Image (cartoon, grey):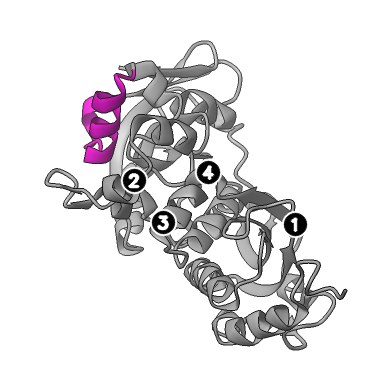
Amino acid sequence: MDYKKAGVDIEAGYRSVELMKGYVKETMRPEVMGGIGGFSGAFSAQALKGMEKPVILSGTDGVGTKLKLAFLMDRHDTVGIDCVAMCVNDVACAGGEPLFFLDYIACGRNIPERIAEIVKGVAEGCRQAGAALVGGETAEHPGMMPEEEYDLAGFSVGVVEEKDLITGQDIREGDVLIGLASSGVHSNGFSLVRRVFDMTRESLDTYYEELGGTLGETLLTPTKIYVKALRAVKEAGVRVKGASHITGGGFYENIPRMLPEGIRAQVERESYPVPAIFRLLQEKGRIEDRIMYNTYNMGLGMVLAVSPEDADITMEAVRSAGEIPYRVGLCKAGEKGVDIC
């Protein structure tokens, strides 16, 4: 008896590391110290040296049951982007710059080529966010997970000047809400998605005219990363008062998280186009409007609160970063919460 016969292939682990090295190398920043494969990832604190009062930010998350679609479609190069996005967007919501990222992959069996594809996506997400992929872990769990399945999670560390922290405490009545377009469902609500649609290869390969592609391709579209857009707004001289990453809990849970007491957000339904995938999902699942807005991003992956005089500058800055902004509502006096009208 040996470790391989018990279900853990150490040689496969070595091969996985070799296959992913090229992708990891593409994410390096000048502050990264040492090579790939050390016991810890080293990142120079020189990145903080020029700051007056640096504040360290962190975010951790996973991809959730969206992974089930990746298993069914045998496509593994996009879920890593989702994993990074869920973490770095949270850091960006506080006004921070993501510095580095680490991933954790748990699998039933280490298939080196598949692990490399997953890390390829993680590296692409890091590249989009400007963060270095400084380490990670691939854990083989025979007998605990099915051989063909895996779970993926990670965390990001970032930094921001204390004076530039986005806290939401300065939001006032009359401030404007700017929504940034999502790429689709992103990485939340897939337990409901999997109840509405048949989770078979045939179903996922079905082409829908209104989607402009197959159901599977549409659902696997990776989560948008908004780091560059937030940076562009800051560089345009705008102080973002509040930022909300629209993840699990949709509008009703996430928008109030950026609001101070006594301020209520009002989002206008007709102020932006809701992507076709949400219309299809709602129709086939016979889902009530409130449930949709309490589960999904409904086409807005992030919502910013800015002063009225900064609204146009913010919109232009977001466009310059390659994202699509919409003026979606206002902040009003009232009990903290959100109205969709």
Q: Which residue is mark 4?
A: 65
Q: Which sits earlier in the primary sequence, circle 3 or circle 4?
A: 4
What residue appears at the point 56 percent right and 53 percent down from the top-left corner? 92
Quadrant (top left, top right, bottom left, bottom right) of the C terminus: top left
The amino acid sitting under disc 2 is: Gly
Q: Which residue is mark 2?
A: 184
What residue appears at the point 62 percent right and 60 percent down from the top-left corner? 147
- Does any portion of residue 223 appear in the rendered image? no
Q: Which mark is residue 222?
A: 3
Q: Which sits earlier in the primary sequence, circle 2 or circle 1?
A: 1
Q: Which residue is mark 1?
A: 56
Give the x, y percent position of residue 270.
21, 27
Marks 4 and 1 sit apart, C-alpha to C-alpha, by: 30 Å
What residue appears at the point 73 percent right and 68 percent down from the top-left corner? 137
**Dominant secondary-structure state across the stretch colored magenta:** helix
Marks 3 and 4 sit apart, C-alpha to C-alpha, by: 14 Å
Give the x, y percent position of residue 256.
54, 25
Marks 2 and 1 sit apart, C-alpha to C-alpha, by: 30 Å
Give the x, y percent position of residue 320.
31, 63
Q: Are marks 4 and 1 in contact (CB under 8 Å)?
A: no
The amino acid sitting under disc 4 is: Thr
Q: Is residue 103 above or below residue 167?
A: below
Callout in the foreground (3, 1)? 3
Marks 3 and 1 sit apart, C-alpha to C-alpha, by: 27 Å
Label 3 crowd bin: few (<14), some (14–19), many (20+), radius 10 Å: many
| Towards the viewer: 121 or 178 | 121
